[in-house]
Amino acid sequence: MKRKYLAAATLAALGTLASGAYAQTSVTVYGIIDTGVEYVNNANANKDGLLRLSSGAMNTSRIGFRGTEDLGGGLKAVFQLENGFKTDTGEFDSAGLLFNRQANVGLEGSFGKVVLGRSFTTTYDFILPFDPMGYSAQYSWVTSAGATGGRKDGMPTNQPNIIKYQGKFGDFKLGATYGFGETAGSTSDSAKYDVGVGYESGPFRIAATFDRVNGTAASATNSAYDKATTIHLAGNYQLGSNLSLSLGYRNYKKTLASNAADLRSDFFWGGASYKVTPVVTLIGAIYYQNIKNVASGKDADPIMYSVRGKYALSKRTDLYLSAAYAKAKNSQLVGLSRDDIAYGSSQTGVIAGIQHRF
């Protein structure tokens, strides 16, 4: 009889330990499924219109796994795996990459969080929240814009082989990213550097970042490489509970190993989000890029006007209708999307879609 009681007590103790260990570990599966029907004009060299099913128009469709383990003393192990995919075809966003958006592991505590692997840059994390269109693939130019000769002049967004730090101290937020170039014989070739600071007090938020991305060496005997640097400033002010105003600026400079003229541009954006009712939100934004250091009459200086209406069917599901118009000067090419090839000096598009978050 004593043996039975001992066995029962042992099993109960093991069960308690197991449940306690499980309670200290958390894994979350999350994602977005976003699909719409889109029409754009000037979609090919013949200036034809295009009607298509478009994935990730308001936010990129994705599935991810996020986990934490309590290590004690306020320290946690963290990881994140995230894949972007296209709902119209079922393909990965990036061929050959299983977790093209996030694949990292690290530690988090009172000092902040440090992760290693593939992740979004400090510039992306600090500046994208100030985009009125909200991380939109259509129609926003905050990550990059279409301009002269196919130039994008954008920010470094998602990168592999990085160490990233982010911490919050009172009203201030600090961040830094270092990307390994992984080139034998050089720690500078293909390396990435990124720092940011943010401040939030009441209805006011502001952030500033600086980053540099080094190119690869010109040749085995010439160690010179291209260098692209960007400076971002962005701010937001919340007027009551319904109206939000945002402004942003990017200075872009790329020096070339060939000693050709630097590529330079200034990029500006601004917009507002207004909650008409608890379930209806209206958004408007303007994006403008001033191209510099190009021959007279060859600068595109593109501008894009974007609007969106959202209707919340629930906390997780929205219907939306977005439209945009982009125009470039001097008959240069410009497109609404940061990804598609441009075929005309202007383009108009409209998309109606549905997004579900889980």
Image: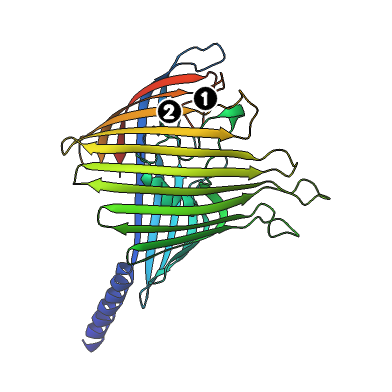
Q: Quadrant of residue 202?
A: bottom left
Residue 162, horizontal then vertical, whole percent? 56, 57
* Labelled disc at residue 334: 1
Above or below: residue 100 compared with residue 336: below
**Mark 2: secondary structure:** strand
Q: Residue at x 59, y 35 (%)?
A: 292
Where residue 304 is drawn, which disc sits there? Answer: 2
The image quadrant that residue 133 belongs to is top left
Find residue 267 and name its label.
none
Disc 2 packing (10 Å; few <14; some 14–19; many ≥20): many
Q: Nearer the viewer, residue 142 or 7?
A: 142
Left or right, 227 with respect to 67, comes to right
What is the quadrant of the C terminus in the image? top left
Q: Nearer the viewer, residue 206 or 30?
A: 206
Q: As displayed, is residue 180 above or below residue 243?
A: below
Picture quadrant of residue 95: top right
Residues tagged 1 and 2 counted as in contact (Cβ below 8 A): yes
Instruction: Identify which amino acid the numbered label 1 is placed on.
Output: Val
- Alpha carbon separation for disc pair 1 and 2: 9 Å
